[in-house]
Amino acid sequence: MQGRTAERSRIEEMLAGGRAGTSSALLIHGEAGIGKTTLLDYAADRADGMRILRAEGVETEMELAFGGLHQLLLPALDVVDTLPGPQAAALRGVFGLTDDGARDRFTLGLAVLTMLAEIAGDGPLLCLVDDAQWLDQPSVEMLAFAARRLQAEGIVMIFAVRDGAGGATVKGLPALLLERLDRATAATLVPGLPPYVVERVVEEAQGNPLALIELSAALSPAQRAGQLSPLPLREAAPPMPRRIHDAFVEQIRGLPEPAQTLLLVAAVDDTGELPLVLKAAGRLGAALDDLEPAERAGLVLLSGEVLRFRHPLIRYAACRSAPLTVRIAAHRALAGVLDAPRHSHRRAWHLAAASTGPDEAVADELERVAEWAGNRQATASASAAYERAAQLTADPHRRARRLVRAAQKAADAGQDERCGTLADQVPLPLEDPGLAADFARVRAVVELGYGSPGAAARILVECADAIGAVRPDTLSSLLTDAVHAAFSAGDADLIAEVAGRAPHLPQLVVAACLFDEGAAGARDAAAEVSDVSAALDALADLVRIGRRRGAHTMDLLMTGIHCRLAADHATAREIAAAAVAHCRAEGVSGWLPTTLHLLAQTELALGLHADASAHAAEALRLAEYYDLAHRTAHLRALLAALAAVQGQEERTRRLSQDALAYTRPRSVGRGTADALWAQGLLELGLGRAESALELLESAYAELGHSLLALPLLPDLVESAVRSGRPERAREPARLLGQWAAALGGRPGLTAVDGRPGLAALAHRCQAVTAPDCEAEELFRQAVRLHEGHSAFDRARTQLLYGEWLRRQRRKVDARDQLRAALEDFDALDARPWSSRARSELRAAGETADLTGVVAGPVSRLSPQEREVVRLAAGGATNREIAEQLFLSPRTVGHHLYRAFPKLGVSTRAELAPLLAPLLAT
């Protein structure tokens, strides 16, 4: 451990924190032989009073779904019985203890987190994961999921990853890079050699600790005495870690042949179970006694019935140094002894590793493994199994089907790049129309992830055109997905084109009515009242269907989008909440970020900013977890708008710029418009109206259709008026009024007359562009229509009305409106708007204290505490809060313990009445 003082100190601090009840996680990474395993061993040696769980990745077994998780938790499997029912069932399913599949990855991730917390309930816990890059991806995802959410459980998790080795990736953890040792430190690791020899060893080892030890150990007696030629010590100078690998290979080749055979079988096995290894090796003529030379050489470590390699590179060398025929024999031997049902997936992979050409029987076994893994949400492993099955398939049609399935599962796993690679391997043309539809969806996923939503929509439309006549049952799903992509593109012409393909389909009729002329109808589409009426009739039917049990995710999602498009935000929120609940209940976790995004959008429109922030933040966490870059960009734009309301200038700019970096190159018009809208809203709130006008007009131009731009039209009108450009406000004000009249001129879907929130905004915009003789009545109507709707919109209308009254020298009336506006702005923490209201009040002659409302108790809470308290105030239990926020129940209890004194309460029952006024905003 020479030269690792800082690294040792960091580990000791983590262990001390764990003993004190504070959790932590660390990712140690660096090149092979740099000392990662040694640091893990150091942590284990220093973990006095802590329980230790340990796992090690095996390159040859990295496609065995949840093998690494099983390896880590095997010593504590009895704890599974103490978990909540769904979590226990999820773990039993992925470990092959039952035939049940995992409902979704989040239930499973939460189960891992809860299980680790339960284990730590008996004392601090240390989890060590070596060579994590060679663990199966589902295990890495679940362990990293848990590690990112550790807080107050007394758990320390340390992962070691070899840089540049490929394989699984560990995301979102604090990282520690191990650098090479300096020359002076390196020399201390090779004592007892002449200075010249030390210099040569240090020079060739290049600061790599393992290379120093192994190269010095491999010196001949003559070399150790200083008899060195000018040539490199190993006759050539391959890069690290090849030179370390070669040193291990020489050690292994010096063993008797039966010992080499035993090491090879152990190297290609992932269980570490000594009886299993011996049984398989017995088929190749090796026995227990043959292990002694390897143990004596320090290549392997034995403990009870567990066999471990001293260093991961030894396993690698044992496997890679054996001839292909011998490796195949080892895989076949292991497949022959893995006859228990719980090992069926391992058996299939060993048979696949032993196959050198097409083998339909093995391919069938792998397909069953893929289905098994897919049912347990191990989508990356399922994809790998389908891909290997395809490689072993001679029939082109069956190979195409398996490759398409592999690509679909890769997309589900967030591996969009790999999805595209697999799609490129599919033999074309595809004769089966159903398979062609699946293939089109795969291509659309790749295009959405790396290209543009418009191009993704066209891929789906072209497929629908090609197969619709022979497979009309595929039209609805293909075209619904296409219109959803077109909405993401913000392309009215494309929406009209897609909807026009099948305007009779329930999810297309609304778009077909509202966008029948595409962007060409943007200026006067609202005047086509008959089309709007037909759209609202169709939307009412969709809402009735959506309210029934059993509705599909995409149907709910599109119904909510259409409701929001028609400014029926209350119904949109209801449908979006149903879609979120459906995703949670049915395990459709890949769609959860999208449905949460819609829910947050409706809440922003309704002025429910705290709820919108909570749901958007949750959606962003999930989208980042799934690597959904497209959805992540949309969510960052939404969170930027919420930050803009509060005047968080740096956060607004960062989030919106991050969104634009993704959306602009890919023509994601909706996302680009939303990000520009957020920037414009910030500028407008800060009093920079001219800058706001430029940004908001740019946002409008991205969409090109007034209905798609409806939410930003009020801000566009206000910025034009405030910047002294009323002529640029008149057209958007006119369009907003048209749509308000068309959409609200008949009973809506929410049991109120029309859409009063939209009508209020239209009246406000007409007021600021009308002559003074008409403005007051319009302002009065706007304020009246706002009642019961968005407090933020109402406050902004009252601010504008108060400003107008002050200009009319009616200061007393102005102060009434401005005080009401200030109260709402303060409650919403809309700081720039509060500042403007205070300035106007002073100008109107207000003499009362205008320093603002003293921050309430919620302001003393951290963001995480606020979320926990918000849910607890709503009646959720600790376990329910833990499931929603992906924390352990112990961490939830810790947050409540810290929050209660800050709030001045002692029981949960006191939370709701104390926080209801603040948490409802």
Image (cartoon, rainbow, N blue to C red):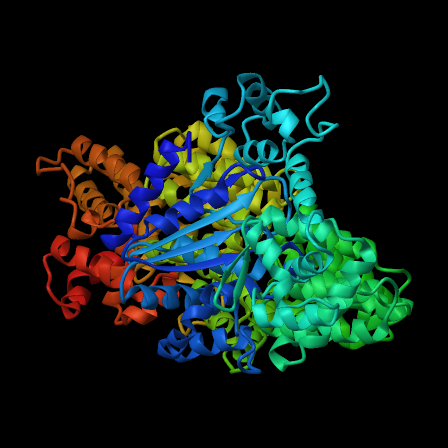
Q: Position of residue 35 (x, y in %)?
A: 49, 39
Q: Position of residue 725 (x, y in %)?
A: 46, 29
Q: Nearer the viewer, residue 539 or 112?
A: 112
Q: Nearer the viewer, residue 424 or 378?
A: 378
- In this rendering, the answer to whether 916 lies above or below 679 is below
Q: Nearer the viewer, residue 830 or 371?
A: 371
- Residue at image coords 63%, 81%: 341
Q: Position of residue 79 (x, y in %)?
A: 38, 74
Q: Quarter holding the N terminus?
A: top left
Is residue 318 toward the left or the right of residue 78 in the image?
right
- In this rendering, the answer to whether 568 lies above or below 4 is below
Residue 493 in sight from this viewpoint: no
- Residue at image coords 36%, 45%: 774
Quarter of the rendering containing residue 343: bottom right
Quarter of the rendering containing residue 481: bottom right
Is residue 95 toward the left or the right of residue 332 in the image?
left
Residue 399 in sight from this viewpoint: yes
Q: Quarter holding the C terminus?
A: bottom left
Q: Position of residue 650 (x, y in %)?
A: 39, 33
- In this rendering, the answer to whether 627 lies above or below 751 is above
User: Could you tell me how many numbered marks the image carries?
Assistant: 0
